[in-house]
Image (cartoon, helix red, strand yellow):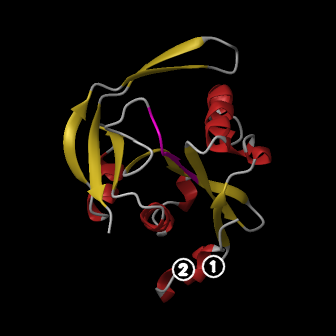
Amino acid sequence: MEKPIQDDVSSTHRSGLLSLISFRTAIESDLVALEWNGAYSHYRQLYQEIFQSAQRGDAILWIADLEDVGIIGQLFVQLNSVRRELADGASRAYLYAFRIKPSYRRNGIGSYMLSHVERRLLDRGFQYICLNVSRDNAAARELYERSGYRIIAAEPGYWHYIDDHGIRQYVHEPAWRMEKELG
């Protein structure tokens, strides 16, 4: 289990809320909470597959757990992928499924989560981290740019998953691929 978030936070203006949050890797019993009271229940099977990938060492599921509230944020990292330009298991990792519950945004939690993950990946020897951000999500893109990410390519954004009813769902989310050199 990771140290509580307050061990790494130095700025006093964030210490109030951030001191009540632990940032840790997910355990299997967290998967239901990742559905955020039904808002993401359609990803139930996908979350289980990602968790199994983490059990094999190919991914890490990070969560922000607020004392007396529960999970208020998540950030997944693929360490190894068939798309080697995203994650190659050695020098390049892929960040995705990054969410902070709306009522907790703009409190430094997202910036902290990014920084935390970047440090942990650097400790593991990774040199680059990349992500895709929806072309319609200007706020997220701004967060990434403030954190040192730059756009390196356009992504068509076609993907699919099996929903909680066993039906294959197709998604089209045109995105920008962004990248940051760690270290």
Secondary structure found at label 1: loop
Amino acid type at image mark 2? Asp
Query: In the picture shown, does residue 111 fall above or below 156?
Result: below
The residue stretch that appears in magenta: 74-81
Residue at x 63% of width, y 20% of height: 163
Amino acid type at image mark 1? Ser
Front one among 154 and 86: 86
Q: Quadrant of the N terminus?
A: bottom right
Q: Position of residue 120 (x, y in %)?
A: 50, 65
Residue at x 28% of width, y 25% of height: 156
The label on residue 101 is none
Front one among 167 and 127: 127
Query: In the picture shown, does residue 100 fall above or below 177?
Result: below
Q: Quadrant of the C terminus?
A: bottom left
Query: In the picture shown, does residue 35 fall above or below 26?
Result: above
- The answer to whether residue 112 is left or right of residue 147 is right
1 or 2: tag closer to the N-terminus: 2
Q: Position of residue 87 (x, y in %)?
A: 40, 41
Query: In the picture shown, does residue 19 fall above or below 134?
Result: below
Q: Position of residue 37 (x, y in %)?
A: 71, 40
Q: Are marks 1 and 2 in contact (CB under 8 Å)?
A: no
Question: Where is mark 2, residue-wise?
Answer: 8
Q: CA distance from mark 1 to mark 2?
A: 10 Å
The label on residue 19 is 1
- The answer to whether residue 113 is left or right of residue 20 is left
